[in-house]
Amino acid sequence: MLLFCFCSTVFAQTDPSKMSVPVAQKEVDFRIPEKSKIEEYQKDSRFQYKKVERSLSWWDKFWYAVSDFINGLFRVAAGSGMLSVVVVLIIILVVCLIIMKLIGVDYRTLMGKKKLDTPEIDIYTENVHNMNFDELISNALKNRDYRLVVRFLYLKNLKLMSDKEIIDWSTNKTNYSYQYEIKNNSLRNKFLEATLIFDYVWYGKFVLDESQFSEINRRMDEFNNMVKHEG
């Protein structure tokens, strides 16, 4: 009985109508082009491809190096989180600014800020007696270059002291050496204050905003008024 049930189950599960029948594969028809056609295409200039090799210039190599450097930074940042991406963007910005500086591009012109014309002067060896301070200060203010304005205001006061014979101006003297020539103690103290401000702003390369410049300009004005009323 058990053998009968087992055989019945096996035959019941095997349906002849559902049995797979091998499908006859279709024969592929291979066609080989005629030799004359192949030769015809070989002679046709439209099908003659040549590999053109061009040596890279130093400029191309430079930009490839910059591109590889930036791509490398992004690959590192991608696996390090959002903070690293921000750091990478800052580095890229700095690199771009350096490149623009090297090739002589003024970033302010790219931002729509046209640089106003200013006289060509050597700000480290200038002769205060040959400078038009009103024009220089006016142009620097239009450019919002408050650091340069502070320099011109300071030099203008040196010229005024020289004109009033309070000091003997010379390119060979340091700013602080003039303090020993100023007899008025109040004026000397004001001069030292102005010199300290100038050194901090100019040699410290301190970038001023409008409110900071306004305070410095007030102090330079006080110094200028003291010089005018001296003697």
Image: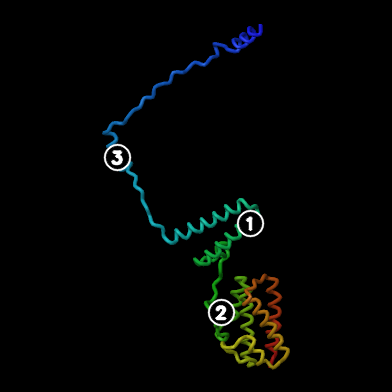
- Describe the element under mark 1 as helix, strand or loop: helix
Specify the quadrant that holds the N terminus.
top right
For the point 64% across and 73% down, the residue is 206
Name the residue nearer the viewer: 12 or 99: 12
Q: Are marks 3 and 2 in contact (CB under 8 Å)?
A: no
Judging depth in this view, the residue of 228 and 71 nearest the camera is: 71
The answer to which quarter of the image holds residue 76 is bottom right
Q: CA distance from mark 2 to mark 1?
A: 37 Å
Q: Is residue 205 above or below residue 29?
A: below
Q: Choose mark 3 or mark 2, whichever is in front.
A: 3
Local SS, label 3 = helix
Q: Is residue 224 above or below residue 117?
A: below
Identify the residue position indicated by label 3 in the image. Answer: 42
Q: Which of the 4 image quarters holds residue 77? A: bottom right
- Residue at 73 percent across and 89 percent down: it is 186
Q: Quadrant of the C terminus?
A: bottom right
Q: Which residue is mark 1?
A: 86
Looking at the image, is mark 2 or mark 1 earlier in the sequence? 1
Q: Amino acid at mark 2?
A: Ile
Q: Amino acid at mark 3?
A: Gln
Q: Earlier in the sequence, mark 1 or mark 3?
A: 3
Q: Nearer the viewer, residue 153 or 134?
A: 153
